[in-house]
Image (cartoon, grey):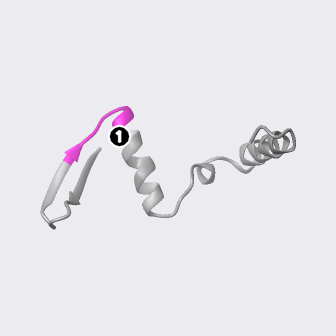
């Protein structure tokens, strides 16, 4: 994955990332676009995670 961006001075640059770095780029771009990781999951998996979090909160572990 290649990212085109600008630094604080407005100068354009490109950076290439593969494997884990490319995945991190996608994650951060999602944040910039207001997308959370949970939104990439199916509704079933999302509900499962929400129930686990709710259980952990009740137990005081979250």
Q: Which residue is mark 1?
A: 22
Drawn side of residue 53 relative to residue 3, left or right: right
Horizontal and vertical percent for residue 51?
Answer: 82, 44
Indicate whether residue 16 is drawn in magenta.
yes
- Quadrant holding the C terminus: top right
Tell me the residue at 16%/67% (across/down). Answer: 10
Q: Could you say whether the residue bearing mark 1 is in a helix, strand or loop? A: helix
Q: Considering depth in this image, is 32 or 55 the residue closer to the camera?
A: 55
Q: Considering depth in this image, is 15 or 10 the residue closer to the camera?
A: 10
Near mark 1 (Cα within 10 A), the count class, few <14, some 14-19 or many ≥20, is: some
Horizontal and vertical percent for residue 29?
Answer: 40, 55
Horizontal and vertical percent for residue 33?
Answer: 46, 64
Tell me the residue at 82%/46% (across/down). Answer: 54
Tell me the residue at 40%/42% (across/down). Answer: 24
Drawn side of residue 36 relative to residue 20, left or right: right
Residue stretch rendered in magenta on the structure: 15-21
Vertical relation: 9 (above or below) 58 = below
Indicate whether residue 5 is drawn in magenta.
no
């Amino acid at each position: 994955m290649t990212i085109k961006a600008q630094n604080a001075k407005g100068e354009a640059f490109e950076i290439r990332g593969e494997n884990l770095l490319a995945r991190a780029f996608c994650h951060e771009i999602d944040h910039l676009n207001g997308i959370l990781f949970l939104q990439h999951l199916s509704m079933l998996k999302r509900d499962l995670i929400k129930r686990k979090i709710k259980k952990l909160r009740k137990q005081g572990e979250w």
